[in-house]
Image: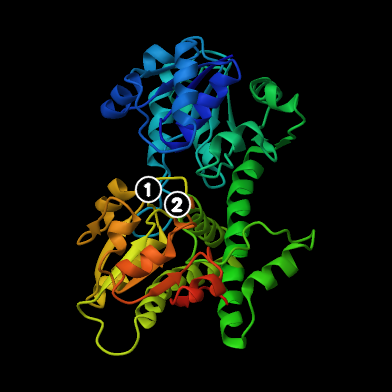
Amino acid sequence: MRIVMIGTGYVGLVSGACFADFGHEVVCVDKDQSKIDALLNGEIPIFEPGLDELVAKNVAAGRLSFTLDLAEALPGTDAVFIAVGTPSRRGDGHADLSYVYAAAKEMAPLLPDGVVVVDKSTVPVGTGDEVERIIRETAPELQFSVASNPEFLREGAAIDDFKRPDRVVIGVNDEHAEKVLAEIYRPLTRNESPLVCMSRRGAELTKYAANAFLATKIGFINEIADLCEKVGADVRDVAKGIGLDSRIGNRFLMPGPGYGGSCFPKDTLALLKTGQDYEAPLRIVESVVASNDQRKRSMGRKVIQALGGGEQHGKTVAVLGLTFKANTDDMRDSPAISIVQALQDAGITVKAYDPEGMDQAAKVLSGVNYCGDAYEALDGADAAVIVTEWDTFRALDLDRVKGLLNTPVLVDLRNLYSRHDVEEHGFTYVAVGR
């Protein structure tokens, strides 16, 4: 089938490349000249393991192309996926749908009859209704459908998630849209990945509900970790004990400095606003959002306390990891932002290293000394703090680390190390929940 993907950000580029790898003809459209130029030159504007090879393979096969010209891309297309950003709207926290609606308005007079317009972006309940209204207002004679197909991709594992999903959710209000989307995803359903079909509004809500529930698990285990520290328990034991219950599961029960990224922060907030709009307040999600916001800053205080008593002004801390999780360059709502700011507010100098995220970090964090590797960041610091669980931080040479630090203090916010192993090397070791 012929597919047009509007937006070459994280969701659009990964989805477009994977659809092309299924054998579909895919054209990715973006208004950003620099992005399109980079893609035409074989450069990938985001870091996602394996994406550069997947894009290159399908471009070479003639199944994947890039353009700035929407009018050039749309003729003969079977489905148009809207994969543009829906950030939190400044001031009130609602999802900013201006890019979605602008895409709908621009494409409306160019769409062929029989096309299915698919919201791939994460959008609140009722967005599909408005997209349909915008298109129908501009092109009243057009025969078309509007559907919802939310993504459930984990940054750092997005290609595998797309090709081997737990499920594919499609929200449709007519049989034609269901048939087209079923054909697009047929390569997956042959491998027994379930295609879950529901109403358009049901699919829109499913995405938010899933992310809010996962955020709740993270928030819950982080609060249990705090309690473990107070009572002398090990949160890893507690997480294993509850995670083996099949009704709960062990995923998203790893304590840490709080959730961040492109999805959980904005999606939980948007869900809260939807609940308020429909007079159905979501008190549990409300508490999760507040707890997560507080936790990020508290991790900064945890590092300051680990430096010991006395005046902290003028000391130096090495921050290892800046992105919100490993295997991505995404800094959106990363816990590192609050941690670094808390340290700087206390007059502490921050040296930092991240394998992929320093260019993005420099856009949101000023006054940081960015280093070429972990050991350069550690050299001359008064303490080290592991913020992101990159593999390179799991096997540090602890003897070398100790020799580089002014004082052997390691704050492990991801519980990557054994307390016994670290303390055996003469460190003061501070972990989360144990």
Q: Sort mark 2 into few (<14), some (14-19) or many (20+) by Cα contacts within 10 Å.
A: some
Q: Measured from the top left, where is residue 84 in percent x and y? A: 42, 36
Of the pair 83 and 19, the residue shown nearer to us: 19
Residue tagged 2 = 392
The Cα–Cα distance between marks 2 and 1, rounded to whole angstroms, is 8 Å
Provide the secondary structure element on which disc 2 rests. helix
Q: Residue at x 64, y 42 (%)?
A: 203
Say above or below: 167 vs 354. above
Find disc 1 in the rendering and name its residue. Answer: 355
Category of crowding for the residue at label 1, using alpha-carbon neighbours closer than 10 angstroms: few (below 14), some (14–19), many (at least 20): many
Q: Determine whether, in the image, residue 366 is placed left or right of residue 212.
A: left
- The answer to whether any part of residue 134 appears in the image is no
Measuring from the top left, give residue 197's x and y in whole percent: 72, 35
Say which of 214 and 120 sits in front: 214
- Residue 139 visible in the current orientation: yes
Q: Is residue 285 left or right of residue 359?
A: right
Q: Disc 2 or disc 1, which is closer to the eye?
A: 2
Looking at the rendered image, the quarter that the C terminus falls into is: bottom right
- Mark 2 touches mark 1? (CB < 8 Å): yes
Q: Residue furthest right?
A: 246
Which amino acid, by three-letter code, is at mark 2?
Thr
In percent of width and height, residue 186 lies at 70, 22
Of the residues shown, which amino acid type is indicated by label 1? Answer: Pro
From the viewer's perspective, tell me whether residue 78 is left or right of residue 364. right
| Residue at screen point 29% across, 60% down | 377
Please tell me which residue is depicted at 37% across the width and 45% down the height of the picture.
Answer: 356
User: Is residue 289 depicted above or below 208 in this figure?
Assistant: below
